[in-house]
Amino acid sequence: MVEDTDRRPTRDRQSILASRQLEILEAIARGAPLASTLADVAALVEEQARGMMASILLLDADRRIRHGAGPSLPEGFMKAIEGEAIGPAAGSCGTAMYFNKTIITPDIATDPLWESYRDVALAYGLRSSWSIPLLSSDGRVLGSLAQYYREPRDPSPRDRQLVDIARHLAEIAIERHQAEATLRNRNAELEALNTRLKEMDQLKSNFVNLVSHELRTPLSAIRGFAEFLEDQFGGPLSTEQISYVAEILRGAQRLQALLDDLLDFARMDAGTFHLEREEVELVSTIGKTLESLRPLALVRKIDLEGPPEETQLRLRADPARVSQILINLVGNALKFTPAGGRVSVAVFPLGGEVRVEVNDNGTGVAPEHLLHLFERFYQVDSGNSRGSSGAGLGLPICQALVEAHGGKIGVTSTPGVGSQFWFTLPMAV
């Protein structure tokens, strides 16, 4: 039952109005359904103005009228305007939304704006109407708020005050509802995308695992027969033929390294990767690794230096994996350093850990690439390394191996000056 507040003293009416506004705002804050909130807003206006009927209409994406609330308006009238397009002569509400301005109709029977809806309005006893557009914070038309009476009349100052209060509440409710709906849709899209990415990642992992295993057998055959040819088991080879065989073996070695990287990633993704920890003398491990890379440095005419041999630093680590980290980092430094350049490895004990630095005076890395260097399959295109770049797996594997040991890895670089790749490992207790 609607309370007749017109007969209450002004102070009582204002107190009731303020209390009802607070209730509606609290309902909006709680996330109450939009339909019930708009019905409360319309009822608030009707409670404060005897004989007046309020409606709140929404504007959809196709610029058509949708029902919001109209607790006292005839149901048949509300159904008659549902889905109608707004326009320059679409009653009070449709016109207000179209022009984004207040439309006042003192007498529906004579107003040309109501020509298309006059008969249905009069049939339900509606004679006067005025409507104000509801706007979002950025000025978009959200809908309209209207007042109807059963007799011809203009809006009173009190009517205008009520409409202004109700408009503010309705705008808050509608805009919050739309924002929440947009957020829900975005969340649903992100969840669907995340699910798809997980599926793709799983497919990629399965593919990598399958390919890496299936290629091992034919690769072993290629390497084996190439070594037979190199040893001239099938007869003597010309100098040119020997160079061809050497290229076959180098290609097979590169492919073997790529397969090893792929298998490491497959094991990491599957959770079957583990370290074989033992006591490791770091400087000795670095020295052995650099010796294995020295032929490459000689071919490229690059000075390769390691830490002083007398330095003693013991770790509890997987020696093969530490060597793998160094081969990747030093190999990259040799790859991106021009002839006549220098690559060095230095070690620094830092409390309970040791820091290893691989320095070069090569081409360096541009700032836009630095944040992506440790992403899988990311490659930096460099003019002096074309044709010798890998699959973009070496650095991500280094990161995984370092972190598995409990350390950290990073890089600093200046284009044209050189780069420093560093990593830390815990010292043996």
Image (spheres, helix red, strand yellow):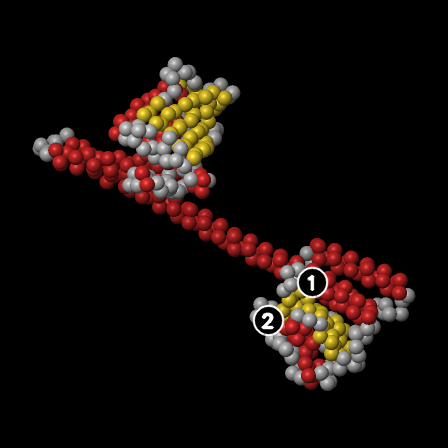
**Residue farthest right in this picture:** 9
Q: Residue furthest top?
A: 310
| Residue beneath disc 1 | 171
The vertical placement of 81 against 205, above or below, is below
Within 10 Å of the Cα at label 2, are there few (<14), some (14-19), or many (20+) other Cα atoms? some
State which tag comes first along the sequence, 1 or 2. 2
What is the CA distance from the residue labelled 1 to the residue labelled 2?
A: 17 Å
Q: Answer few, some or many: residues within 10 Å of disc 1's Cα (few below 14, many 20 plus, some between 14 and 19).
A: many
Task: Please indicate whether residue 146 sits to the left or right of residue 409 in the image.
Answer: right
Give the side of residue 128 with respect to residue 209, left or right: right
Does the image show residue 331? no
Which residue is depicted at the point 79% across and 67% down? 162
Instruction: Please name the amino acid that badge 1 sits on.
Output: Glu
Most foreground residue, 238 or 209 = 238
Can you see residue 215? yes
- Tell me the number on the disc at residue 18: none
Number of numbered discs visible in the structure rendering: 2
- Quarter of the image where one finds residue 297: top left
Mark 1: which secondary structure? helix
- Residue at figure coordinates x 82%, y 73% from the top left: 156
**Where residue 135 sits in the image (x, y, percent)?**
67, 64
Image coordinates of residue 309 in percent, x first then y, are: 37, 16
* Quadrant of residue 150 within the rendered picture: bottom right
Question: What's the residue at 73%, 76% (across, down)?
Answer: 104
Quarter of the image where one finds residue 51: bottom right
In the rendered image, which quarter contains the N terminus? bottom right
- Identify the element where label 2 is drawn: loop
**Which residue, given by chain and number where applicable, does mark 2 sit on?**
63
